Amino acid sequence: MAYRWIVATSVLALACAAALTLGAERGRLRAQSAAPQPTVAHGFAVRVIAHVDEPREMFVTSTGELVVATLTDAVYAIDDAEGNVKPPRVFTRIDDAPVAGVARGGDSLYIGSQHGVWRLPFHDGDRRPEAGPKKIAAVRAGGGRGHMTTSLAFADGRLYASVGSSCNACAETDPTRATVLEMKPDGSELHPKAVHMRNAIALGTNPTTSNVWAGVAGQDELEHGHPYEIFDPVTLHSGTADYGWPTCYENRRAAQPGADCAGMTVSRVVFPAYETPVGVAIYPRNATTHAFPASYRGGAFVALHGSWHKPLVPPRVVFVPLHGDDPTRAVDWNDPSVQWTAFLSGFQSADGSRTGRPTGVAVGPQGSLFVGDDLAGVIYRITPSR
């Protein structure tokens, strides 16, 4: 099907442009003698605790190990991340880069790679895996191009995997594409929990409600400033939630004449267009030593990677206040900035040059907030400055 709003630009050209832009950014950053620190909200302190190449999804164990997935073939572990931080060490490798997704479920570690979801034994304090990774589910089985990261979340005994589209706007033939998939911990009973989501890179579980939230990078080439990026609890909806891509967007707006958008799921939270959500952590209510103030507990920290196309939208981490799975402010379809506030910023200067791009977000058992940065290749730790 032809869409009047798609320009004659191939998916390969778009992917190459994004890769070249990121590569140029990394080259400029390496040429700097010292990159400035990002700016954090008043009452907090931020510092770099580790250097990891291209970090993405992360989680922290009950004993303080920070497990970091990456855009490479390696998953790292950083011991005592809230205390006497140890240097990063490779925990495991999978020959299917990028291994950008990681989640913990019981005594298992789950890793999302380009073409699969993998499972291996995992216990707090493990120095190395007891056994090698076992592939439990295949994604992008048909190959193709487009979005190649697989994000993961674990909730209520079920594993969730987000798989991005093969294109900017098209009718997918691979049933795993443009979805959030649900499965049992062994990979069986694989089925879509959400469909028509262009690229739900940010995936995270609300520890209070056990619902899985997804932040989605929307399509290009609609009218400028649209579509708003969406952030929604996909498992809160019964059945299979349909988010409308590529024929519908936002508040059931049609992207082409005659599209029927009546049945699409409307997101509870939105961000401005091109912000690109890539990581999320919902702050628990039971943090201890480094607990954030009460106003932050239960809310979501979302890493916005910024745009790759010009004019450049700046990278930042934002905070969305929540009551359970309800945002404290409803969506304003005329203003996508009312539901959140900037928390960590200062990654982009007035001339568009960047010192970092935030990615994965995680909370430690003592309450520290960890943020990955795949441009600078670092992990930040944020704590109250009291």
Image (cartoon, rainbow, N blue to C red):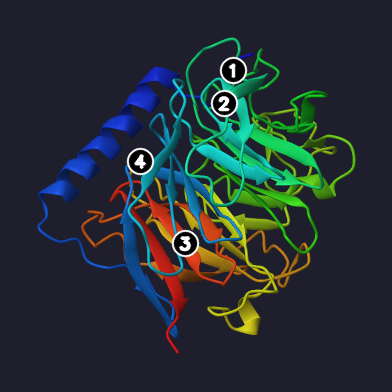
Indicate which disc residue 370 carries. 3
Residue occupied by mark 1: 140
From the top left corner, tell me how far across and down residue 186 is, in percent: 75, 27
Task: Name the residue rendered at 67%, 64% in the picture.
Answer: 332
In the depicted structure, whether residue 203 falls above or below residue 289: above
Task: Residue 176 in the image: state x and y as whole percent.
Answer: 67, 22
Q: Residue at x 85, y 46 (%)?
A: 237
Mark 4 secondary-structure assignment: loop
Residue of label 4: 309
The amino acid type, in three-letter code, at marker 1 is Arg
- Amino acid at pointer 2: Pro
Please report whichever mark, 3 or 1, sits nearer to the chain's N-terminal start: 1
Residue 276 appears in view? no
CA–CA distance between discs 3 and 1? 30 Å
How far, Cα to Cα, is label 1 from label 4?
A: 26 Å
Quick check: 118 left or right of 23?
A: right
Of residues 132 and 278, the one drawn nearer to the viewer in this rendering: 132
The residue that appears at 52% across and 23% down in the rendered structure is 167
- Residue 356: % across, % down: 31, 54
Using the numbered discs, state the Cα–Cα distance from disc 2 to disc 3 in whole angstroms: 26 Å
Q: As drawn, is 48 to the left or to the right of 263?
A: left
Given residues 6 and 145, the one toward you in this image is 145
Q: Are marks 2 and 3 in contact (CB under 8 Å)?
A: no
Q: Nearer the viewer, mark 4 or mark 3?
A: 3
**Which badge, 1 or 2, comes first in the chain's sequence?**
2
Gap between marks 1 and 2, in whole Å?
Answer: 19 Å
Residue type, numbered disc 4 = His
